Amino acid sequence: MNIGPYTLDILESGHFGLDGGAMFGVVPKTLWERAYAPADALNRIPMMARCLLLRSAERTILVDTGNTPLMPEKLQKIYGMDFSRVTLQASMARLGVTPEDVTDVVLTHLHFDHTGGSVQRVDETYMPAFTNARYYVQAEHWNWALHPTEKDRASFMTEFFLPLQEHGVLQLLDGPGEVLPHVHVELHNGHTKAMQSVRISDGSQTVFFPADVMPTGGHIAVPYVMGYDNFPLTSIQEKKLLLPRIVDEEWLVVFEHDALRQAARIVMGQKGPQLSDEQTITPFGAPEIAL
Ligand SMILES: [Zn+2]
């Protein structure tokens, strides 16, 4: 699709699976299975690590870099990671985009499933994967990632982001604003400190990438927040403030971790927010329900 000066595409970096209970916090399984998808024998639900690609005459922008096969094998098993069907590199290649083409990488936050593809391994050392790009991270989040809580420590793999600083391609941001033309970021503190959501708007249409504020279409109801969130009550407040804007201004929401749908709008139904107008922006074949 086109928005402002950009052609917008979806990139898929790999299937994975997380514990459904952890993904839906206090919500009972009978409810989240209905809202999203049935769990497998290990109670995992199917997930995707999805990224945005924005291309204009001047720039090629990536928003998040997803999962990576560089993840240690033991952890790939635990998280049910599957790179046999799709990887970030393959998704880009299908669209004729090379890593060298990328000029900017906006990282919503530094959890491994959002920043894994930021690096490549050359002779046992990790280097930036996009050699011509600047990488944008919120300064407050960068500091948090280096001093995480016990709750999200396991989600930060420093080899996926420290090389960005070491190679001088990191640009730390100080709060919300327009990072690149028509690309706005906003800060959220429920999931982790200073996560930035990304909004691309051209006046007539808006695409919204909420990252882990709403990781799947099963998470649009206000109390459906993740057990992973550091500050769940903050997540609830943030969703309450976002939903009326999403609904009233008819934003197209891209769900970063939804294995079943790429994007949808949200309408207010009698029982609360509902998905509407589900869209496949960049086709990748049939959605996978089983892991
Ligand atoms: Zn996260």
Image (cartoon, rainbow, N blue to C red):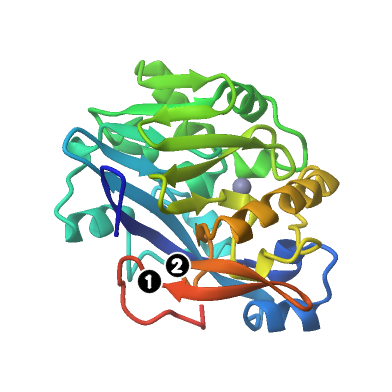
Pointer 1 with pointer 2, Cβ within 8 A: yes
**55 sits left or right of 193 in the view:** left
Q: Using the image as rendered, state which of residue 274 and residue 258 is in the foreground.
A: 274
Q: Residues within 10 Å of mark 1 (few under 14, many from 20)?
A: some
| Residue at horizontal 50 percent and vertical 42 percent from the top | 198
* Res 56 → quadrant: top left
Asked if one can make out residue 64 in the rendered structure from this viewpoint, the answer is: no
Report x, y in % for residue 90.
24, 58
Report x, y in % for residue 152.
70, 42
| Residue at horizontal 65 percent and vertical 32 percent from the top | 194
Q: CA distance from mark 1 to mark 2?
A: 6 Å
- The circle drawn on residue 69 is none
Q: In the rendered view, tell whether residue 20 sits above or below residue 25.
A: below
Asked whether mark 1 lies closer than 8 Å to ligand 1, one says: no
Q: How many marks?
A: 2
Disc 1 marks a residue whose amino acid type is: Thr
Q: In the rendered view, tell whether residue 73 sits above or below residue 34.
A: above
Q: In the rendered view, tell whether residue 284 sits above or below residue 67.
A: below
Disc 2 marks a residue whose amino acid type is: Gln
Report x, y in % for residue 91.
27, 59
**27 sits left or right of 288 in the view:** right
Q: Using the image as rendered, state which of residue 153 and residue 88 is in the foreground.
A: 88
Asked if one can make out residue 189 in the rendered structure from this viewpoint, the answer is: yes
| Residue at horizontal 69 percent and vertical 33 percent from the top | 193
Report x, y in % for residue 131.
24, 29
Q: Using the image as rendered, state which of residue 245 and residue 61 is in the foreground.
A: 245
Report the residue marked by disc 2. Answer: 262
Q: In the rendered view, tell whether residue 35 sits above or below residue 15.
A: below
The mark nearer the N terminus, 1 or 2, is 2
| Image quadrant where one finds the N terminus | bottom left
SS category of the residue bearing label 2: loop
Report the residue marked by disc 1. Answer: 280
